[in-house]
Image (cartoon, rainbow, N blue to C red):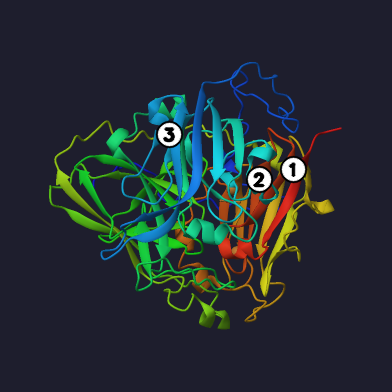
């Protein structure tokens, strides 16, 4: 595969611990975070407040208004009979026609294509026979707009969302978030992409239109009647035996001999992917959860945990017509190596770490080489070194499994916030997620589960990863695939690992969630509220 030649290899930064000396925070951190454009920000409702030090917003952006319902549907996914699913179905009420794009022949929800600064208004109608609510994963929105389970609505009810798009250009997504039913609702089909663009991104001339391909990766099990079988193990999560990309099995990416932007979302409940081309060509990563990296990075494989996104620049322009290759998920040591391994996967699914084919690409026609990938992609606006140093001592969260996942020994409670879960608007903090198993490895209480930890309402920087649990062999089967040099909202914390993040609580006060994005862990209670309070 043709690719830019002068990329620096291994941009993976292992920063020495804050307060431990040798702070090599380097060029990763500069300037300030997610900045607001004062002329496009609109605070909403009583809980909305502009972050400290920012000008008061003055006007509204262009309105994009859609109606979106969660409903029953059925699709031809496998030969021999339709599969019943739940689906987000949308129509555009106002705004540019390109704001709403449906995936043909797919149960997946529509793709919302928005610009930073627009106002999004969504009339959500719940037509499935259980409570639901929509969460906008990765976006910063007022707390009543965030899809907290306390806002779940019954069948037949509706909920109106309205918020400005504050985030940078990037690949975000939306999915249900009712308490204890997020896993099954996503599994049966409720998920969609929300793609944001902005001026900085537009200036790059990245592959667009037909050359900008969203690829949502999920694993499923079909029964003999072609119906989705959700047999989830609460300890390990759901594992399927079949990969779907954009809702289709045996996905074939028919491409021109040209550069592509591939937007990957791991929309699976619990499966982690170790993505690589089968011909050994490296992957060029240009974006993570919160948008474009400062510079492209290359990886032999990319690790993508549930909820995470990665964007690839895949240049097929030197490939002769007829070239085929597969994107695969390579085998890795998916469990800590302890006895818990025996519990990996549901009855019929393939365990975490099993090698699986994801999709096949075929060059079917000639194409244009394009302008090439710029060496510098964006000014990510990372937090300043000085701010990182000044941030308070880490706020630590211990991740444990005792029949179900716990965070600092606690399970989810709908309204409550512990005293160590209160932050102040505008504060920059260091958060540490420690997956150390409460002091040992054991079958039920040990640290043999990976936890993709997600924080609502923010994009954060990964500062440091420390392996303390003594499982380097297993860890090393995945760790070269982490891309930590961009904005993230979900970070994989492996068994034995402690990960430190730099996170700033901007934009809004209110009640938000942080949780494991293994959806069965989340539904089992590995989720907590945190509250952003105004200063003074
Ligand atoms: Cu995508 Cu609270 O999650
Ligand atoms: Cu989220
Ligand atoms: Cu978990």
204 relative position to 440: left or right: left
Residue at (29% x, 41% y) in the render: 260
Q: Which mark is residue 47?
A: none
Q: Quadrant of residue 110?
A: top left
Residue at (63% x, 50% y) in the render: 154
Q: Relative to 40, is 7 above or below?
A: below
The residue furthest top is 58
Residue at (57% x, 83% y) in the render: 339
Answer whether residue 474 is visible to the viewer in this image.
yes
**Residue linked to disc 1:** 391
Q: Quadrant of the C terminus?
A: top right
Q: Callout 1 environment at 10 Å: few (<14), some (14 to 19), or many (20+)?
A: some
Q: Which mark is residue 377?
A: 3
Quick one: label 3 or label 2, which is nearer the N terminus? 3
Q: Quadrant of residue 356?
A: bottom left
Considering depth in this image, is 126 or 257 the residue closer to the camera?
Answer: 126
Assign a secondary structure to mark 2.
Answer: strand
Q: Relative to 410, is 178 above or below?
A: above
Q: List x then y, in percent, for residue 22.
A: 66, 50
Whether residues under marks 1 and 2 lie with C-beta atoms below 8 angstroms apart, the answer is: yes
Q: Relative to 297, is 336 above or below?
A: below
Q: List x then y, in percent, for residue 184.
A: 53, 61
**Residue linked to disc 2:** 502
Mark 1 residue CB less than 8 A from any atom of ligand 2: no
Q: List x then y, in percent, for residue 126.
A: 56, 47
Q: List x then y, in percent, for residue 52.
A: 74, 28
Assign a secondary structure to mark 1.
Answer: loop
């Amino acid at each position: 595969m043709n690719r830019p030649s002068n990329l620096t290899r291994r941009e993976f930064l292992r920063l020495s611990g804050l307060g431990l000396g040798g702070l090599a925070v380097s060029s990763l951190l500069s300037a300030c975070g997610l900045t607001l454009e004062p002329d496009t920000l609109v605070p909403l409702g009583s809980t909305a407040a502009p972050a400290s030090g920012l000008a008061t917003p003055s006007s509204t952006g262009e309105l994009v208004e859609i109606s979106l319902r969660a409903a029953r549907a059925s699709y031809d996914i496998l030969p021999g009979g339709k599969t019943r699913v739940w689906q987000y179905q949308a129509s555009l009420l106002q705004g540019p026609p390109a704001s709403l794009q449906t995936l043909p022949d797919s149960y997946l929800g529509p793709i919302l294509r928005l610009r930073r600064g627009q106002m999004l208004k969504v009339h959500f109608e719940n037509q499935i026979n259980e409570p639901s609510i929509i969460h906008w994963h990765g976006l910063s929105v007022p707390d009543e707009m965030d899809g907290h389970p306390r806002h779940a609505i019954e069948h037949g009810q509706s909920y109106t969302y309205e918020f400005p798009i504050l985030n940078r250009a990037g690949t975000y997504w939306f999915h249900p978030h009712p308490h204890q039913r997020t896993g099954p609702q996503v599994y049966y089909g409720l998920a969609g992409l929300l793609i944001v663009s902005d001026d900085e991104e537009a200036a790059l001339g990245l592959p667009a239109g037909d050359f900008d391909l969203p690829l949502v990766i999920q694993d499923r099990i079909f029964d003999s009647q072609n119906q989705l079988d959700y047999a989830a193990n609460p300890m390990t999560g759901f594992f399927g035996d079949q990969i779907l990309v954009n809702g289709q099995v045996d996905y074939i990416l028919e491409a021109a001999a040209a550069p592509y932007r591939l937007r990957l979302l791991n929309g699976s409940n619990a499966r982690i992917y170790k993505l690589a081309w089968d011909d050994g060509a490296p992957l060029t990563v240009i974006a993570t959860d919160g948008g474009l990296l400062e510079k492209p990075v290359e990886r032999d494989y990319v690790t993508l945990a549930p909820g995470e996104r990665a964007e690839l620049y895949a240049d097929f322009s030197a490939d002769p017509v007829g070239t085929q290759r597969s994107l695969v998920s390579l085998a890795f040591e998916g469990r800590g190596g302890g006895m818990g391994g025996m519990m990996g996967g549901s009855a019929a699914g393939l365990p975490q770490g099993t090698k699986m084919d994801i999709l096949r690409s075929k060059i079917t026609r000639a194409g244009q080489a394009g302008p090439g990938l710029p060496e510098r992609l964006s000014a990510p606006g990372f937090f300043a070194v000085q701010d990182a140093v000044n941030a308070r001592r880490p706020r630590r969260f211990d991740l444990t499994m005792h029949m179900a996942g716990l965070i600092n020994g606690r399970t989810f409670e709908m309204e409550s916030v512990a005293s160590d879960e209160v932050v102040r608007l505008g504060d920059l903090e260091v958060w540490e997620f420690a997956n150390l198993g409460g002091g040992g490895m054991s079958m039920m209480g040990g640290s043999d589960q990976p936890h993709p930890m997600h924080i609502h309402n923010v994009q954060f920087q990964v500062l440091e990863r420390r392996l303390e649990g003594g499982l380097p062999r297993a860890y090393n089967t995945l760790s070269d695939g982490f891309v930590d040099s961009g904005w993230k909202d979900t970070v994989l914390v492996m068994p034995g690992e402690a990960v430190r993040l730099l996170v700033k609580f901007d934009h809004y006060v209110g009640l938000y969630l942080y949780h494991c994005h293994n959806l069965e862990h989340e539904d089992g209670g590995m989720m907590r509220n945190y509250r952003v309070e105004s200063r003074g």
